[in-house]
Image (cartoon, rainbow, N blue to C red):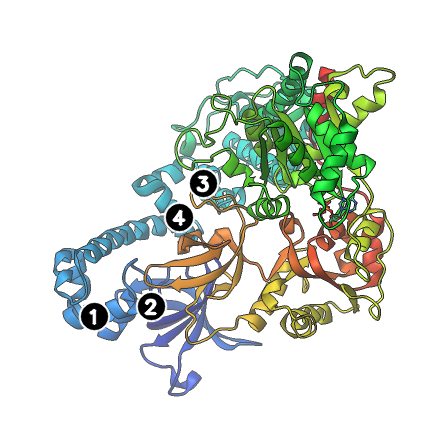
Amino acid sequence: METLRGVIERITYLNPENGYTVAKLTPEQRPRHLFGAEGEVTIVGNMASVNVGEFVELTGRWTIHPEYGKQFLVEGMRSVLPATVAGLEKYLGSGLIKGVGPVTARRIVRHFGLETLDVIEHQPTRLQEVPGVGRKRTRMIIQAWAEQRAIKEVMLFLQSHGVSTSLATKIYKHYGNDAIAIVQADPYRLARDIYGIGFLTADKIARSLGMAPDAPQRVAAGVAYTLNQATDEGHVFLPADELVQAAASLLEVSPQQAAAGLIQLWAWDQVKVSPSPGQEAPKPQEAAPAQPLPLLMAEAAAPYAVATPAQTQHLLQEKPAVYLTPLYFSEQGVASRLQRLLREGESRLPLFQRPDFDWEAAFRRFERQAAPGGPLHLAPQQREAVQAALTRRLVVLTGGPGTGKTTTVRAILWFCQQAGYQALLAAPTGRAAKRLAETTGHEARTVHRLLEFKPGEGMAFQRNEETPLAGHLLIVDEASMLDLVLTHHLLKAVPPGMHLLLVGDVDQLPSVGAGNVLQDIIGAVEAAHARAEGPPDSLLARHAQVVRLQTIFRQEPGSLIITNAHRINQGLMPIIDNQQATDFFLFKTDDPERAAQLCVELVQHRIPRRFGLTPADIQVLSPMHRGVVGVGALNQALQAALNPPGPDKPERILGNRIFRPGDRVMQVRNNYDKEVYNGDLGIITQVDLEMQQLTVMMDGRAVCYDFLELDELVHAFAISVHKSQGAEFPAVVIPLLTGHYMMLQRNLLYTAVTRARRLVVLVGQPKAIAMAVRNNRVTRRHTGLRTWLEQVD
Ligand SMILES: Nc1ncnc2c1ncn2[C@@H]1O[C@H](COP(=O)(O)OP(=O)(O)OP(=O)(O)O)[C@@H](O)[C@H]1O
């Protein structure tokens, strides 16, 4: 074991999950025999809380890394406060204190010299003596310093249980001075309360705190985590047996123990158990704990439920649906509100109520006025859709690209205008809403805006049952993106008597959030119509309708995007003819490395040169996250090519990601405070090391991120096809290789291709395309909405 003392110069890499750090250190005394006279040394190891400028004493050993050469492997670290003026400057200016960057740090240290830390600690108001440091900044420094000290304490505790600096800081920010007590009492709360901490991290802490593998608290948290994971994959519920098995294998406990965990969550109302849609099983009684609880949790623990053998057997054999409670209420709410909407049809007249209304004449008038360039004849299905939207309560209009959905919506709007009815237009994303407004010439809002979302305390949506929307017809475009929870909020705000028209393309990938709303509604309505022999006999058949548009109207000569999109959707190989094509190409290669390289070349040079586009117009869409042509690796390669480091580009490192001005980024969770949502894209315009924040331009709006919030952003030079839903780009580049076989699905390729307005370039193997086109096995989501809707009838 050797000792090395010195100042941390730079942090090259920091894994926020486990604290693994690679850093550069200037040794106090250079070990000449190893490095010659000059230079910094590389140190690697778990140094979670190390800061630039910090003076540290390390214990460990020297090794030689085959690629990076000599390194000091750190085994132990002790922080010593910097003892030189230069060290102090570096330490203070490293971003340690919000409000102090390198310039201010230099001024402060110049003024107070070696007493700097003493002044900050004991006479902080004296900071105002420093030129340029006013009262406001002094207050900021005092607060940040106190916070820093408290964080250090929390960090010491958490670090000894394997938690990194950035997570410790987040934990501190969330719980304040109670952090240690809370973590000790219930480490699994971390996973519930703090974004960025999952069950696995919380579990690591819990195990390190001495929690038994089969502690009821651990098992309950593991079952909840398993169910949450399923929800992230789009399921609304899991059958009990599947949930129990999955949780048991994750936790390495018996199915009986996992079942007990499930029953516990049920007793706490965190989950609902439903034998079949529309039914809720009565919740079990809470019982006194069967065994004494581990000491650690004794105070915090509620009485634990005990799974009786009969209950366990019921769960495993009857396989009732297990829902996270909010999703249960959402599914129930969507079903019952749709039913209410349909029932209104029994008592209220529809918008266009006169049986003798001359539709034919009205359509002719619309067609004359709507197409000044020449007559437009609505196809029979389009007319059917117009009529349905105005005479039925719930209508779904679905069709692929260019099949005339927007034209149909324009016709519906024209009819409403003629009759003096108010129509409301909305779409799930900002981009889709903008496009809808452009193509219809009618105001369109995001669903959040429509419902007057107010972040913060209390009721989030201002439009709800008490203050519903006003209008006669609500049209929601891109409805395939509506997840269950948002649909529920939307339906709450739909007043009795309003007509609802959902427009979308049901063959696209389903919503990112849980549920398969559009597909479930279509399934229920079409089945009701198929059953209704003679006069329609059910609510669904009488008052709901699905219209499928199939004719492709938008066909430009030589253009293959739309033709190929439809071919893919029908299970046919797209037409690939690089000689003749103007907008659909394949660059063949079997080699993933070459494919990745091609993607970069295409975005950087080839497409801009040939099509007059800029790299900003081109989006790379990858079916997967991992691998050489996965989203992660492509982002690194594209960033290196399109936005390399530069002298005027300050950087912020998070794990193996480096954020710098000019980067394309995507928000990966809904953040209602900032009004940015999962999938929103933007460009970093500023990285402010002094204020420790960066600014992203999103849709013309500057959004500010504290460095601690950077786990909400990922690079977006390449994004996954799933995340591209609802977006459109002038050009898309799609790598497709047989190694992706898990992800080679028809609706995925279809969704990717339909994102492009002017150009599609596939990179990879024809065989991979064929596999995707053939694979129509859409991953099934567990949802109960369809059955639930059918039950009313
Ligand atoms: N009945 C029709 N006869 C002739 N042209 C039509 C008809 N309906 C639509 N079109 C034309 O076809 C093109 C595509 O129509 P529209 O934009 O309505 O389709 P869409 O389904 O909304 O497409 P996307 O989903 O790609 O936006 C438009 O140029 C439109 O003018």
Residue 366: x and y, percent?
72, 37
Q: Which mark is residue 190?
A: 3
Separation of residues labelled 4 and 3 (CA atoms): 10 Å
User: Which quadrant of the view contains residue 99?
Assistant: bottom left
**Vertical side of 95 occupied by 345: above or below:** above
Which residue position is annotated with label 4? 170
Foreground disc of the pair 4, 1: 1
Residue 118: x and y, percent?
16, 61
Separation of residues labelled 4 and 1 (CA atoms): 30 Å
* Mark 2 or mark 3: whose residue is earlier in sequence: 2
The reply, left or right, for residue 78 in relation to residue 122 is right
Which residue position is annotated with label 1? 107
Query: What residue is rendered at 48% in x and 43% in y?
Result: 202
Query: What residue is rendered at 61% in x and 69% in y?
Result: 614
For badge 1, the amino acid type reads: Arg
The answer to whether residue 780 of the structure is visible from this angle is: no
For badge 4, the amino acid type reads: Lys
Q: Quadrant of the N terminus?
A: bottom left
* Mark 1 or mark 2: whose residue is earlier in sequence: 2
* Element carrying mark 3: helix
